Image (cartoon, grey):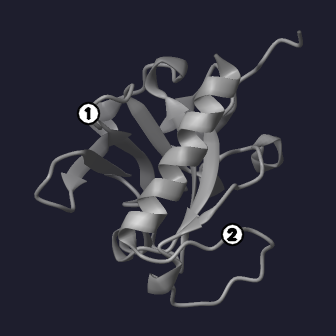
Amino acid sequence: MAMQTGVSSQCSCGAVVINTVDMPICRAFCHCTICREFNKTDYADVSVFHAKNVEPFDESKIEFKFYKKQKLVSRGCCIKCKNPVVEKANIPLMPKLLIIPSANFIEIEKLPDPLVHICYDKRVVDVEVDLKKHQGFVASQLAFSTALITNMIKRS
């Protein structure tokens, strides 16, 4: 079996660097209003990691906030450049996950291909990519969770 290697990401100013010891569990495109606002893009291209596969990083350089009353995902931006660097997902019955904007990766070509579009009904631009486009919150969360869990099982 080939040895897995990680990837490194950084914010636009380079103040926050995040190194991983493995590849992401999965990658997805999200069109929801929160992801668009947080990522400052027309849609979010994100890579999801087991928190245990991300090396410790300096959280004092990151300002975290919650966008919803349920405090399941805290989203963090660099305090210097104000750009997104990481989201910490604390979802019941799931391992701790970190979500990193794919654009932050130094070698983005090493990332796996995205698996799904979620919340496509909230899109602000049409995307011509040959991926299933899920509409609505429940269907999107189900599709994303299915992709995530399927890849977790494949990797275990």
Position in image of residue 121 (x %, y %):
48, 84
Q: Earlier in the sequence, mark 1 or mark 2?
A: 1
Q: Is residue 36 above or below residue 66?
A: below
- Amino acid at dot 1: Pro
Give the residue type at disc 2: Lys
**Image quadrant assignment for residue 126:** bottom right
Label of residue 92 in the image = 1
- Give the side of residue 47 with respect to residue 84, left or right: right
**Position of residue 143 measured from the top left corner of the image (x, y, whole percent):** 53, 57
Q: Which quadrant of the figure contains the N terminus? A: top right
Taking 107 as reference, is 82 above or below it? below
Q: Which one is nearer the viewer's eye here, 109 or 78?
A: 109
- Secondary structure, mark 1, is loop
The residue lying furthest to the left in this view is 69
Residue in view at x 23 percent, y 45 percent: 72
Q: Residue 98: horizontal and vertical position, in percent?
A: 44, 37
Q: Residue under circle 2? A: 132
Outermost residue to the right: 2
Q: How many dots with numbers? A: 2
Residue for point 16% across, 47% down = 71
Badge 1: residue crowd in 10 Å (few <14, some 14–19, many ≥20): few
In the image, which disc is placed on residue 133?
none
